[in-house]
Image: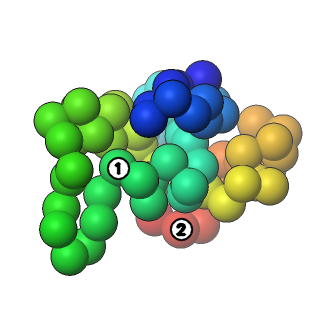
Amino acid sequence: MITYQNRKFETRELDLHDWGLVTVSTTSLGDLLFNNETGYPSKEAEVIDETIFFFVAENEIYLSDKELAKVVLKSL
């Protein structure tokens, strides 16, 4: 779990073999951390973003490890 702007966001650690152990979180967190027009709103946002390997939809974060890994790998 990551807390940012007083909100908690689900995270998961996955072993993606070729990529090793990675952290995955939700797109709602990703949207708060980085804006395509203005960039990072803070240094804290940048630091958190650099620890997340991939962002998935809210409902996908609760998939089994195997299914979540498929979603991530399919999108790389």
Quarter assignment of residue 64: top right
Q: Amino acid at mark 1?
A: Leu
Residue 53 seen anywhere in this rendered image of the structure: yes
Task: State which tag comes first along the sequence, 2 or 1.
Answer: 1
Closer to viewer: mark 2 or mark 1: 1
Report crowding for label 2: few under 14, some 14 to 19, many 20 or more residues within 10 A (C-alpha).
Answer: few
User: Dot 1: what SS?
Assistant: helix
Q: Please say which color scheme the image uses.
A: rainbow
x, y (%) of residue 36? 25, 73
- On residue 10, which mark appears? none
Q: Is residue 24 left or right of residue 58?
A: left
Distance of label 2 from label 1 (alpha carbons): 20 Å
Query: Who's the residue at 35% across and 49% down the image?
Result: 33
What is the tally of numbered marks visible in this picture?
Answer: 2
Q: Residue 33, which numbered label?
A: 1
Residue lying at 65% horizontally and 34% vertically, measured from the top left? 10
The quarter of the rendered structure image containing the N terminus is: top right
Q: Nearer the viewer, residue 27 or 76?
A: 27
Left or right position of 31 against 69: left
- The image shows residue 29 at horizontal and vertical percentages of 50, 48
Q: Is residue 40 above or below residue 62?
A: below
Q: Position of residue 56 (x, y in %)?
A: 61, 56
Which residue does the numbered mark 2 point to in the structure image? 75
Q: Position of residue 47 (x, y in %)?
A: 23, 32
